[in-house]
Amino acid sequence: MPNNRMVFKDENHKLSSAFIKDLQKRTALDLSFQSEARWDNNQKTKYITNLTTGKAPSKIIVANVNLCLERHNPGSDDWKYFADWKKENKDDISIDGNNRTITIDEYLNGKVKIKNGDYPLSDGRVVSIDNSNNTWYSHPEEFREDILETTQVTVSRYINCSRQDLTDLFLNINDGFTLNQQEKRNAILVPYSKWVRKLTKSTYKELLSKVFPTDKQRYRRVIDEFIVSMSIYTTFGHTTTIQADSKNKAYKDNSSVYASRDRAKKLIEDFAKFVDINSDSKLKDSSTLFNMFMAFVYLNDNKYVFPRFESQHKFYDWFMKSENKRIGDTKSTMTTPTGETRTYASCNSTMSAPELTFRFNQIIKDLSNVIGKVNWIASTDSRRMFNQTERYMLWEKQGGKCTITGKLIPESEINDNSKWAADHIVPFSKGGKTIIDNGQLIDKTENLKKSNKIEVFA
């Protein structure tokens, strides 16, 4: 049950009022509820024409900052939310009607045209509007005066909202309009929601415009959803399904994904710069972009670097070529838990954990064939542990079998340290290097039987 009954007041304001004149300036645009202006000129003209002829009854809906603030305990999350808007000198928060608010402001500043035709004035006279006088400053004076005094805008002001109430209001108002899942998440007032929007905005031109170029994708939060997927991946890796449920959980207060936001922010911003510098017109597919991100995160986590500036482009070029080969490979397949056989290309159509893991393993398999053989990837880590690429290379060198027991090591279990351990043949403490020639992937149980003459590292 709701905690309180929502209270609002309808107010009618003439276009000549100071309230309408300052409406856009004094109203906060929280992108949880509103998109940035997305009406084209035709939509703006249609609205202004209907408004000035009394055929646009839709209300502008806002929540009053000061009155809502008074209804919450100081220091609470709700109180902080409204207090932040008050600091920005905002009187109201827009819930519905941003495009109308912007269009009214633009019309009164001569930026929006009214439709050509004959318009009756309140005293019975008729004014003809054509291309020579269809903007505000070119209107006949009697037409401007009549519009200012007779045209009214209805504003519904809510006075007792919480953050959850604002979310509910937005969803209820848009009940007749099909919102996608990300638009609904975006209306959840948690810090993660604001973090996603901010990161989307800061990386769009560098990263996301490559594969999400249309205004519709931006307005419908497709781009935001991709950022969410990337941040979930940096938190949990390829073994977690990145679909609706995990995305919804990320929008809970104090979610694990939000807790690891600093790591995600750095990786995503670094990746955005990498893509901006190196990408070309061939990078158009979102799955390719995400696969490249998985490779980028892998290199970062295993302390590989590009030793020279041009090395980044060589890696990018290698990745695009190897990706095309993986997509075209119909022989390399995986079997889903339901028994369906899928190729790399078909796995790209989903973000379920099994398919995501298969994509990751295929990428790392190809990457392992170039690491140590090219001069555009270098390691900066004097490590005691074998990384995932090296574990794969050990597995491949051993023919997929444990060197002690001869047991077959399933490819899917290469990185499962509970079953298989990577160790140094010549112990690290005795000068043994963490290199393929000095490593072996062995049965974990057998490892426990070994003496301390051999050092084992997962």
Image: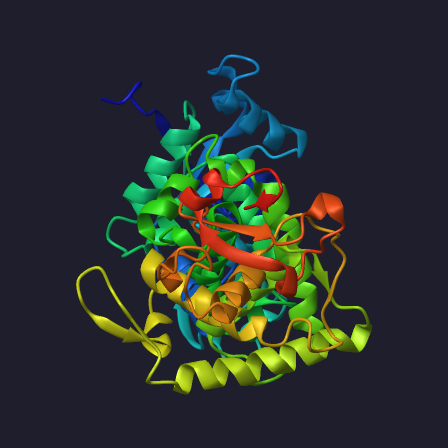
Pick out the residue farthest to the right: 308
Task: Name the quadrant of the N terminus.
Answer: top left
The image shows residue 216, relative to residue 79, as above or below, that is below
Q: Nearer the viewer, residue 18 or 175?
A: 175
Q: Nearer the viewer, residue 307 or 205?
A: 307
Q: Nearer the viewer, residue 380 or 322?
A: 380
Residue plotted at (60% across, 32% down): 85
Q: Count of labels shown? A: 0
Color scheme of the displayed model:
rainbow
The image shows residue 338, relative to residue 453, as above or below, that is below
221 relative to 375 in the view: left or right:
left
The image shows residue 66, relative to residue 317, as above or below, that is above
Residue 23: percent from left, percent from top = 56, 44
Residue 190: percent from left, percent from top = 48, 35
Q: Nearer the viewer, residue 385 or 162?
A: 385
86 relative to 287 in the view: left or right:
right
Residue plotted at (40% across, 61% down): 357
Residue 374: percent from left, percent from top = 71, 78
Pick out the residue farthest to the left: 338
Task: Tell me, yes or no, if residue 378 can be seen here.
Answer: yes
The image shows residue 446, relative to residue 110, as above or below, that is above
Residue plotted at (44% across, 73% down): 42
299 relative to 365 in the view: left or right:
right
Task: Tell me, yes or no, if residue 45 can be seen here.
Answer: no
Quarter of the image where one finds residue 314: bottom right
115 relative to 234 in the view: left or right:
left
